[in-house]
Image (cartoon, rainbow, N blue to C red):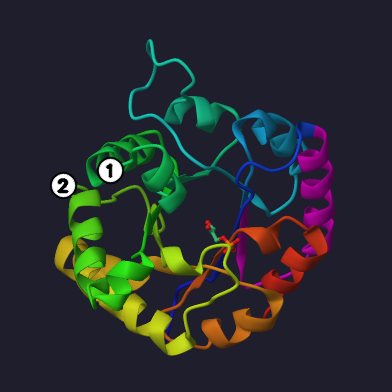
Amino acid sequence: MDARTPLIAGNWKMFKTPQEAARDAAALAELVKGVEGVDVMIAPTFACLVPVAQALEGSAVALGAQNMHWETEGAYTGELSGPMLKAAGCSHVIIGHSERRQYFGETDETVNKKIKAALEAGLKAVLCIGETEEERDQEKTLNVLDKQLKDGLKDIFPGSGEDALVVAYEPVWAIGTGKTATDDQAQEAHAFIRKVLAELLGKDLAKSTRILYGGSVKPANIAALMSKPDIDGGLVGGASLDPETFSQIVKFQ
Ligand SMILES: O=C(CO)COP(=O)(O)O
């Protein structure tokens, strides 16, 4: 029996003012009220965390951030720490998104530090990994995933609850492009990720860790993706911005 509760997470990236974010979070909370058997999380910008936390009060929708620094405080202009995110109402934090790797110099080493710090702060870490189109064409996908997992999770053994770590497989070529990995391509990558997790964390933790698919997830393709045994949810960008559309993804079953 598969004990993993699906997680549908929305990455709002650099969209929405605090007012828009609070309004949309409240609308989403209402739309998914009473939906059972699936966890829901949204990750707005830093500026929106507090108003969104207030809008989500009393709802089952969890709040996440899109990034964090690994130190708890200090002279790091423009950064936020794990304890600060926690105090702002976050339960989750996305780490190592490909846009951060691509545009902001995020490496497997900084990802590793951030995951350690996130778990230490009591946040659930959503580790993003995925290959570029060029790497896929050169048949390097599994090597890339192997390295990102092994370096990103170096010396990390999540101990604060079985869902402290979530992995999101996001093929870079499928993000915001309308191209989705086929269900079989995604399943192949997810099964491989679970195998590597078993080497790193042990079989039990690998079995209970949720692996999300991300990259042009929409209401029309979520059910097929979710029918695959190792796909445990979605990390949704564009289609998470509209509460009605995102709620359709949440209600995929
Ligand atoms: O990057 C993503 C989620 O983190 C995916 O974005 P899209 O759903 O817009 O392709």
Q: For residue 241: magenta? A: no
Q: Which tag is nearer the camera, tag 1 or tag 2? A: 1
Residue 60 in which image quadrant:
bottom right
Give the residue at mark 2. Answer: 155
Q: Is residue 253 visible?
A: no
Position of residue 219 in the picture relative to residue 100 (left or right): right
Residue drawn at the location 74% of the way across and 32% of the way down? 51
| Vertical side of 23 occupied by 141: above or below | below
- Three-letter residue code for mark 2: Asp
Dot 1: element: loop
Q: Nearer the viewer, residue 156 or 177?
A: 177
Q: Could you tell me which quadrant the N terminus lies in?
A: bottom left
State the separation of the CA atoms marked 1 and 2.
Answer: 16 Å
The disc at residue 43 is: none
Residue at mark 1: C-beta within 8 A of ligand 1: no
Q: Which residues are magenta?
A: 19-41
Give the residue at mark 1. Answer: 107
- Three-letter residue code for mark 1: Thr
| Vertical side of 5 occupied by 110: above or below | above
